[in-house]
Amino acid sequence: MPEPLIWANLLHLSYNMWLDTPGDSPVSYSPDLRCDDELWAELTQRMADAGFTMIVIDLGDGIQYASHPEIAIKGAWSLGRLDEELGRLRGLGLEPIPKLNFSACHDAWLGEYSKMVSTKLYYEVCADLIDEVAQLFDRPRYFHIGMDEEAASYQRNMELAIMRQHDLWWRDLLRFADAVDRNGCRPWIWSDHAWRHPEPYYEKMPKSIVQSNWYYSAPFDSDESGRPREVEGDDRYLTYLDLDDHGYDQIPTGSNWTVPENFGRTVEFCTERLDPSRLLGFLQTPWHPTLPEFRDHQLEAIDVAAKAIKSVS
């Protein structure tokens, strides 16, 4: 019998994933943890009630790591607090999955080490964190390592822009994936590198790495043959089909970032078009801090996904 579909939601413990300096923008760097305890508890309970089976936790600098305590920001959770919360989540029926984004575009959480990409010390720190987090999460089935949007165009507003290219990007990706694999977990990444470099992507990407393409708009147009036709300005959903054609396991990713109906349409499109043996499940991504001012958006993300879960169950 095939495994049940995964129904996952991404919540941010840390939100230091974008800009590398403080400022007025919500995505600016903050030396303080941006995660409200009461909202976190409300959202996770709502997820469990809605039929979610997994929570992907963006850890970043929101944990007081034993291996590198210098990374933690003010308000970061202690290891005891994390362990207690992981137990509570499992009790709700939510499988906790860690996420540490090692993209040079989204690693402000690494602090000074984000300025040392692809150096000996950088590799040692990243390996230490992967080992520690895998142990803290009790060798989870999956371990999300990000690796998205590592291109100059995404770093226009950063003080220091770093971009690995060509074989260096691949060497570092495989280094992180191997570190995850050694800990008994399966590496999981965002798939947008395939948009910019499709030929090497499908030639070099190991089948062992779980793929999450993402597409947040409304249209999923198709022609008479059933093959989607390109939507002017945004045809990224076609990558779901390309990944399927090349035999990759996928967890397609939707969001209410642009329109609330995206997640339901993502589920409908992918359940109809993808090989069910390689469709592991779906991931919802609100992409806002876990703070009270974003409560309505976070709840909307859960509620629209709940309708999609019921439509498939």
Image: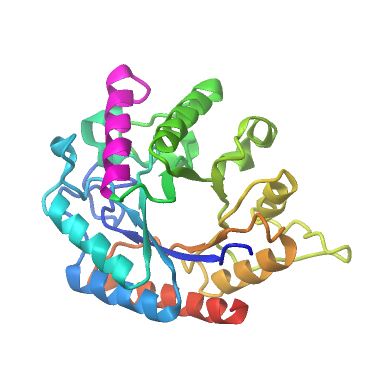
Q: Is residue 125 left or right of residue 211?
A: left
On the question of residue 163 being in view, the answer is: yes
Q: Residue furthest right?
A: 224
Q: Residue furthest front?
A: 1
Which corner quadrant of the image does residue 117 belong to?
A: top left
Q: Residue furthest top?
A: 120
Between residue 6 and residue 264, name the one nearer to us: 6
Query: Residue 297, image x and y in percent?
Result: 38, 73
Q: Is residue 82 left or right of residue 134?
A: left
Query: Residue 245, image x and y in percent?
Result: 75, 48
Query: What residue is shown at x 33% (from left), y 47% (from top)?
Result: 17
Q: Which quarter shows the C terminus?
A: bottom right
Query: Residue 151, image x and y in percent?
Result: 49, 35
Magenta segment's dominant SS is helix
Query: What residue is shown at x 18% (from left), y 39% (from top)?
Result: 71
Per the image, is 125 magenta? yes
Query: Residue 38, image x and y in percent?
Result: 19, 73
Q: Is residue 84 left or right of residue 299?
A: left
Which corner quadrant of the image does residue 159 belong to?
A: top left
Q: Is residue 194 left or right of residue 82?
A: right
Q: Which quarter shows the N terminus?
A: bottom right
Per the image, is 57 magenta? no
Query: What residue is shown at x 29% (from left), y 55% (from top)?
Result: 25
Report the span colored magenta: 116-136
